[in-house]
Amino acid sequence: MGVQSVEQLRAKKCLPCEGGVPRLTASEAEAQLEKLHGWTIVHQGERIRKEWVVKNFMAAMRFFEEVAEVAESEGHH
């Protein structure tokens, strides 16, 4: 797959995972995350994670509503 820029990743659409997709190696994942601000590898290399800080509870709710809209539009629930 190769390392992708933030712009390349933003242009992608989410596809439901049907399995059979090879996992990135640890070095591939590390190289990719060098391009992505604030993301870290967790759970023994099985997941990536990012934490956001918001001003208050209502800002957090608006953020998650926007995330939910993107997930719904891409069929990724």
Image: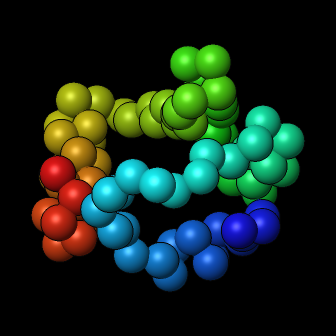
Name the side, left or right, on which 10 lies relative to 40. Answer: left
* Vertical placement of residue 26 versus 18, above or below: above
Identify the residue at horizontal 85%, vertical 41% (top origin).
27
Name of the residue lying farthest toward the front: 20
x then y, percent, for residue 43: 55, 18
Of residue 44 and residue 64, the one placed in the foreground of this image is 44
Q: Is residue 27 visible?
A: yes
Question: Which colour scheme appears in the figure?
Answer: rainbow
Q: Quadrant of residue 8?
A: bottom right
- How many marks the image carries: the answer is 0
Name the side, left or right, on which 7 lies relative to 28. Answer: left
Identify the residue at horizontal 47%, vertical 77% (top origin).
12
* Vertical placement of residue 19 versus 12, above or below: above
x then y, percent, for residue 18: 32, 57
x then y, percent, for residue 54: 39, 35
Q: Is residue 69 visible?
A: no
Name the side, left or right, on which 38 lies relative to 47. Answer: right
Of residue 64 and residue 13, the one placed in the foreground of this image is 13
* Vertical placement of residue 2 versus 12, above or below: above
Of residue 61 and residue 24, the one placed in the foreground of this image is 24
Identify the residue at horizontal 53%, vertical 33% (top origin).
47
Identify the residue at horizontal 68%, vertical 47% (top origin).
24
Q: Quadrant of residue 4?
A: bottom right
* Vertical placement of residue 74 versus 34, above or below: below
Name the side, left or right, on which 75 lies relative to 27. Answer: left
x then y, percent, for residue 1: 71, 68
